Amino acid sequence: MTKKVNELMTELGVSYQDIKKAADTMGIEVKSERTNLAQKDADRLNDTISKLKGLDSKSDKNNNKPKIKAVPIISKDFAHKPKAPVGKPMPRKAESTDGEVDEVKAKSEVKVTVDKEVKAEVKAENAEAKPKTTKKKTAVKEKPSDEVKESKVANKEKAVASNEDAEKAEGKPNKGEEAAKEPEKKIEKKEESYENAPNKPMRFKKIFDASSAPKEEPKPARKKSSDKDGRKDSKKDERGGRKNDKRDGQSRNSDSKQSRSSSRPQSSAAADAPMADKPQTKGKSKKFFDKDKDKDRDKFKHEKRSEGRNSKSRFFDERNLEKQVKHRKKKAPKVTEPEIEIEELLPEGAVAVTVPITVAGLAEQAEISVSKIIMSLMKLGIMATVNQTLDKDTVEMLGEDLGMQVVVTEEKEEVVEEGLDLREDKENELKPRAPIITVMGHVDHGKTSLLDAIRNTNVTAGESGGITQHIGASEVKINGKKIVFLDTPGHEAFTTMRARGAQVTDIAVLVVAADDSVKPQTIESISHAKAANVPMIVAINKIDKPGANVDRVKKDLADRGVLVEDWGGDVISVPVSAKKGEGITDLLEMILLQAEVLELRANPDRLAMGTVIEARLDKSKGPIATLLVTNGTLKAGQSVVAGTTSGKIRVMTNFKGEAIRKALPATPVEILGLSDVPMAGDSFNAVKDDKVAREIAESRQEKMREDVLAKNASTTLEKLFSQIQEGETKELNLIIKGDVQGSVGAIISSLEKLDTEDVRVNVIHSGVGTVTESDVMLAETSGAIIIGFNVRPTTAVQARADDAEIEIRTYRVIYDIIDDVQNAMKGMLDPEYKEEILGKAEIRETFKVPNIGIIGGAYIVEGKVKRNAQVRLVRDGIVIHEGTISSLRRFKDDAKEVAQGYECGIGIEAYNDIKPMDIIECFHMVEIER
Ligand SMILES: Nc1nc2c(ncn2[C@@H]2O[C@H](COP(=O)(O)OP(=O)(O)OP(=O)(O)O)[C@@H](O)[C@H]2O)c(=O)[nH]1
């Protein structure tokens, strides 16, 4: 049995086009009106079209839309068909027949499409066929798409609103009302569904959704939405849609029973529809905007928080900003929660984390138990508490360990510190100031000697190891004009300090020995001066020496890009002899000349600011800091904040040690009164109020604590990470303790340069002061070696270290630290000789003995003291002196050695500064068998 198409047309009273479209959709071949249809196909078509005709004809009475537009279609084929072009309704070929409805209906029971148009159509169909199922499923569906023209949407939605609504639809309800009602109902249902994960930020919800509700993202919808404009439908739109729903649900009033009244501005279908459902009035595709706008808007907001987006997203943002403004005029939509915004940009299943974050915070954010995170951290070698702050690397590693995808953003807070005078000086406030000079150059080229020559003092002889180890500052006057010199050390170990010096300096004096010419540290010095954009003056030193060759120096400098005046450049060079004092005046005059060119000025009539040049802790005086005032006037009695410390200036002395009341710009001073030791290189500011100074310092301390916590965690992490990554590679963990901050910084920077392919140097902790028990504990947990520079551990600390088998290595010369560590890294760990402590004596009293000097009345507290052994004098954990015993007596008799528990008199060779409570440590060197 067959039936011709035209017969069916007559039978149903529909056009050929209607049948053709329905047939196409149902996979029935129809070539012309004369095509013979198999009875089965004819029946299917008849069935479908009859149903649709009935439905449409009802609504058609109230609107003139072609009934075919309300045909609900969802078939296997349909899901694969291309979507409507952007901004246009779906083509008519999406129409279906009755036979198809059954198929679709069945499908709709097992799959819920995300595609808005399809969904609307499914609803329309189900309204007739299986309203209950439809109702249930619509609860998790997206709102209708704008792809379908408003009237069409209205028609369809009207039909599927609910069981009752569907019945009303049959009763030819007012189309406008229905259209208005339907989307609202759906939104409410969706709200309910969202409430299933109550009170959860979207990011939590997303994780929840990802794991518990995958069925809500059916594949056919994804496929269908894979056309150009809707390519991200499947996931992004799911989220975006959810968000829209939420927003719409919040902002919109509904006339349904469940809705609460609100001030809805419009009552038309268009006004009531979600933003995405509004009629397309602009040239651009609504669909495009609907699908992308929320995520684009989110991008915009996200970008506001985080920098560095590509131009493409910026474009979206800008465009969307316009878009938002437009919509706001109509609906004033509520701004969505920030969590949702970031979430929108994330890949499926990812968690957005802003660091630093505490363990507890991360647990909450990722919806993982705190204990799970702590366990994972332990696996990574980090012993963390709930309140431990985690940094970016740690969070990423945790993510990996926990099998969780995290997207980490770093929060950069801009701290505005109220109470600091940071205004810019006005032109008329500025007065000339003295130049600040740094002396740089290769080791032993004569920096210290040159400064000595300049200020007629001799520092070289007293320096430990023969090198300058601390930044000092001094002033000289020539022709009534002041010049400030920062004394910077020459060894490579002091690179950091030199770099710091170059930052506060106006002019760098580059010392090059005429007999040695340009050397590695000369080149390094040039780089620092250039990097700091500081003009240089070359002092060609040691011209008195027989091998001196000034021209060679100039040539070598030219090779390094430093053209002195003789070579056609603009760098001033002055031949000098620090030893004989030749050329020193010339050099100073040239410095003044160069300073004049620079027109150095400052405002003396404001609160002082500048840099900490050096700082140390003095047991009796407390923290001592050398400050260089670069602007303003510093007054004794004023409150200052320096780095993370603050205090009121109790005593202020100039470079000669004379107490002064005020220090004008370009003055180095030493101050007492800070509550703690600041770091060399810290900036300082005078503030009006001591309380303000304290508050600023405290907030900086707080910030630093957070940073340190985060850094420590990551350092440990890095260690493990690199061990895992690099297999055999080992890390050398070190704890550095020194007498002053400058030395500690220099040691760290030198040691960190020693990294080799095989061994990585990792300074896990550093600080000023003696080695403490907590250092030993830290070394214990991290397997670190403790390096003490000019500091000694107490007996108790040493005992604790011995128990824990922690090595504490102490030094007095930085070279030795670097050599030792370098050797250790090369596998030559064991030195040929090792220091062995023989005993310790505590000074109880001191006596002045004519012709001999000061003798310490001592009690041997540990081991024994031997006459020929070496000794070091330790005061408050700091090594004051090293030398040999000149006299050892028990009562009036000389003794070869004195054992523990006995008293004796000890004299130190050529040394008299012995005080009660000093510790004399007696040691000798023993050969180590390899
Ligand atoms: N003949 C001669 N020797 C000099 C002159 N200047 C310095 N020296 C010697 O060179 C050696 C090193 O001088 P320092 O002033 O310690 O050199 P430095 O560059 O400060 O060295 P570090 O502090 O170790 O970086 C000393 O033995 C000085 O006596 C000079 O003009 N002529």
Image (cartoon, grey):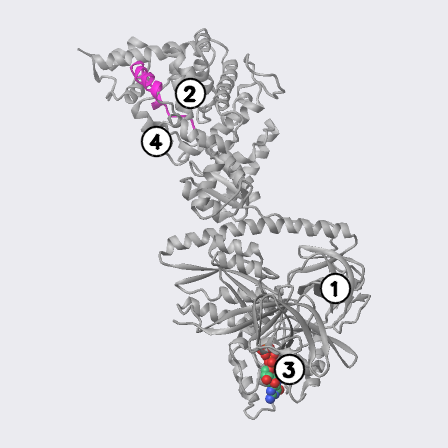
Mark 2–mark 3 Cα distance, whole angstroms, equals: 90 Å
Residue under label 2? 120
Mark 2–mark 4 Cα distance, whole angstroms, equals: 17 Å
Residue under label 1? 671
Q: Is residue 360 left or right of residue 105?
A: right
Q: Nearer the viewer, mark 2 or mark 3?
A: 3
Mark 1–mark 3 Cα distance, whole angstroms, equals: 27 Å
Magenta range is 87-110
Local secondary structure at mark 1: strand
Q: Is residue 223 left or right of residue 296?
A: left
* Quadrant housing residue 81: top left
Of labels 1 and 4, earlier in sequence is 4
Q: Nearer the viewer, mark 4 or mark 3?
A: 3
| Contact check, label 4 and label 3, Cβ < 8 Å | no
Residue 671, x across and y down, in percent: 74, 64
Question: Can residue 766 be seen in this snapshot?
Answer: no
